[in-house]
Image: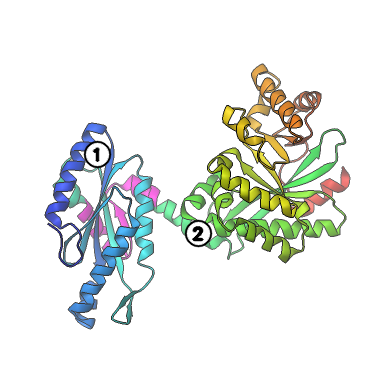
């Protein structure tokens, strides 16, 4: 029951798998998706290069499709140049969008057919259970219908049978494409929020905060696009741009006599990338910035993902002179276990604790405990999101070292930041 050319399940076996997974989805109240794919202009390739080349193309497509999908998914050739993909046990429709994005991506590279490079493309239709149908035949038929809509619109595209999901997924894919181009187009910018020493009122640091000047939606905050950047890998080139530009700006400020450090946030994916040490070293070398003028900020979650790896990476960077701070810090047992092992210079108390510190005794107790523990471990403490004099008075009375927030200033462009420092 396998296709002899591609060794994929044939149509009959695919329909058997689909019936089984549908029964499972009904029992578990889970979603599943059916993808119906058709190669664009396949007949033209067959007619021009011959059937042997067409067969090689089908085999190449089969191999690439298998690399795109999850382990639980099924790829089948149901005849000619048509393929089906079954995606069971879905938690959210966005999972389908990620796989479809990968499928469209693998067709960007040409196929090598007997030393001839051939560009191929595909149109994809997608139906969802339970939204679009309850039977195997209905789901396949609706995925087929959606595929023809995709083919008629432009080819080399995809279409959900369900309009609402289609609109959301297309918007997500569009954001990914625009995000990848944002670095080259100069749409990204860094603002800087002052970090102030509480006992002297002097600026002792600048946290670099990313903004995207989206050509259609205006200025976007990281919360509006970083999840897509992380999932798609676009975060890596964006992160390189951020660390280089933050170091370059800090070098300019050093030339003006500013003696503080710049803080750069690392996403979980950036922190775990194998070349973090090389990337950081290159940014420092190219800008001429001293490692002591750079602080990398990571989340507790990012470190906890792989403590041994985190420890190695952080030690190498701190040996160079780079500092580390940790945000999103909690006071659970796991945190206390690893925090003492890591070369961390500063803990940042999340704004969610600072916001209600004046009225919530429990929040004040957490803040006090973090400050006490940090000082015992020879770490400084920064309170994030300080907005009122009452909040400042409380954290000062408990010995907090630094603060940042609207009470002093929100994030500023470099020139405005310089004016603020000069006036403080």
Task: Please report the residue visible at 74 percent of the width from the left and 60 percent of the height from the top.
Answer: 248
Q: The N terminus lies in which quarter of the figure? A: bottom left
Relative to residue 15, is residue 252 depicted above or below?
below
State which region is magenta.
143-169
Residue 265 at least partly seen: no
Q: How many marks?
A: 2
Task: Please report the residue visible at 82 percent of the width from the left and 51 percent of the height from the top.
Answer: 418
Q: Position of residue 50 (x, y in %)?
A: 20, 81
- Residues packed near mark 2 inside 10 Å, few (<14), some (14 to 19) or many (20 plus): some
Query: Which residue is the site of mark 1?
Result: 130
Query: Which residue is the site of mark 2?
Result: 178
Q: Position of residue 399 (x, y in %)?
A: 80, 27
- Specify the color scheme: rainbow
Relative to residue 295, is residue 367 depicted above or below?
above
* Quarter-of-image position of residue 118: bottom left
Position of 375 compared to 236: left or right?
A: right
Between 65 and 314, which is closer to the camera in this rendering? 314
SS class, disc 1: loop
Tell whether position 286 is magenta. Answer: no
- Residues packed near mark 1 inside 10 Å, few (<14), some (14 to 19) or many (20 plus): some
Between 193 and 302, which is closer to the camera in this rendering? 302
Relative to residue 65, is residue 406 depicted above or below?
above
Task: Please report the residue visible at 18 percent of the width from the left and 46 percent of the height from the top.
Answer: 18
Q: The C terminus lies in which quarter of the figure? A: top right
């Amino acid at each position: 029951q396998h296709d002899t050319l591609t060794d994929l399940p044939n149509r009959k076996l695919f329909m058997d798998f689909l019936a089984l997974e549908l029964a499972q989805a009904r029992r578990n109240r889970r979603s599943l998706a059916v993808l119906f794919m058709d190669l664009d202009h396949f007949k033209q390739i067959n007619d021009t290069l011959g059937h042997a080349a067409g067969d090689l193309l089908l085999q190449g497509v089969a191999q690439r499709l298998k690399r795109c999908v999850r382990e639980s998914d099924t790829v089948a050739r149901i005849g000619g140049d048509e393929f089906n993909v079954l995606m069971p046990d879905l938690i959210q429709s966005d999972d389908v969008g990620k796989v479809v994005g990968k499928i469209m991506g693998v067709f960007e590279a040409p196929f090598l057919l007997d030393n001839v490079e051939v560009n191929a493309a595909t149109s994809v239709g997608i139906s969802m259970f339970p939204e679009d149908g309850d039977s195997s035949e209905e789901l396949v038929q609706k995925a087929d219908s959606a595929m023809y809509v995709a083919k008629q619109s432009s080819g080399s595209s995809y279409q959900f049978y369900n309009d609402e999901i289609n609109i959301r997924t297309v918007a997500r894919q569009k954001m990914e494409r625009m995000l990848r181009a944002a670095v080259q187009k100069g749409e990204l910018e860094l603002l800087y929020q002052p970090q102030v020493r509480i006992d002297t009122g002097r600026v002792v640091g600048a946290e670099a905060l990313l903004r995207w000047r989206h050509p259609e939606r205006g200025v976007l905050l990281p919360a509006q696009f970083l999840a897509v950047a992380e999932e798609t890998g676009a975060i890596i080139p964006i992160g390189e741009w951020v660390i280089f530009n933050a170091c370059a700006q800090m070098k300019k400020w050093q030339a003006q006599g500013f003696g503080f450090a710049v803080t750069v946030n690392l996403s979980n994916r950036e922190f775990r990338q194998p070349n973090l040490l090389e990337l950081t070293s290159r940014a420092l070398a190219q800008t001429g910035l001293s490692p002591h003028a750079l602080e990398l900020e990571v989340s507790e979650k990012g470190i906890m993902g792989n403590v041994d790896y985190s420890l190695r990476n952080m030690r190498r960077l701190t040996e160079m002179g780079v500092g580390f701070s940790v945000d999103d810090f909690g006071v659970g047992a796991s945190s206390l276990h690893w925090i003492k092992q890591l070369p961390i210079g500063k803990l940042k108390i999340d704004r969610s604790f600072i916001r209600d510190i004046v009225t919530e005794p429990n929040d004040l107790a957490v803040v006090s405990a973090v400050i006490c523990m940090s000082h015992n471990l020879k770490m400084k403490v920064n309170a994030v999101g300080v907005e009122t004099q009452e909040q400042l008075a409380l954290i000062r009375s408990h010995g907090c070292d630094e603060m940042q927030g609207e009470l002093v200033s929100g994030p500023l462009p470099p020139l405005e930041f310089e004016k603020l420092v000069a006036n403080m």
